[in-house]
Amino acid sequence: MKESILKSKSYDFAIFIVKTYKIISSEKKELTLSRQLLKSGTSIGANIREAEFAQSSKDFISKMSIALKEANETEYWLLILKDTNYIELDHFNKLMSINKELIKMLVSTINTMKSKLK
């Protein structure tokens, strides 16, 4: 159940990230930082999807850990874009809130799986 929620939240987040990228790149004419955000923000869900068909529990944990790293990187790019005034504070807060929720869910999923391996 949790993975299903994680899967849908990460997909919705990726859509939000793509829309954010389109705004920043077209209206603000910023391409480098926004592209980094696009890559890391959409990679979260892609890795969660990869984990669905993991070959083993260890592979599952590995894929989810990569998704967690991407979420952490996404937080970094969001902070940079906010602090350089490429995204508005309210937009930043919405994205950051969803990203932090994904991070918590990923940590919980990884820890649960690790405890099952012991």
Image: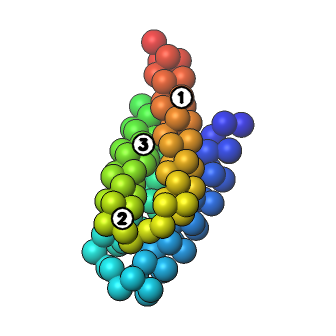
- Above or below: residue 92 compared with residue 70: below
- Above or below: residue 20 compared with residue 82: below
Question: Measuring 62% from the left and 60% from the top, which residue is drawn there?
Answer: 12
Tell me which numbered mark, 2 or 1, is placed earlier along the sequence.
2
Identify the element where label 2 is drawn: helix
Which residue occupies the foreground of this view, 87 or 117? 87
Identify the element where label 1 is drawn: helix
Question: Measuring 35% from the left and 85% from the top, which residue is drawn there?
Answer: 29
Disc 2 from disc 1: Cα separation: 28 Å
Rendered location of residue 2, percent (x, y): 66, 36
Residue 48 in view in this figure: no
Kindly identify which residue carries mark 2. Answer: 81
Residue 68's disc is 3
Is 56 situated left or right of 2 in this image? left
Amino acid on which disc 3 is placed: Leu
Amino acid on which disc 2 is placed: Leu
Which residue occupies the foreground of this view, 112 or 98? 98
Rendered location of residue 36, percent (x, y): 33, 66
Residue 108's disc is 1
Label pair 1/3, CB-CB below 8 angstroms: no
Rendered location of residue 75, percent (x, y): 39, 51
Tell me which numbered mark, 2 or 3, is placed earlier along the sequence.
3
Label pair 2/1, CB-CB below 8 angstroms: no
Rendered location of residue 51, percent (x, y): 51, 45
Amino acid on which disc 1 is placed: Ser
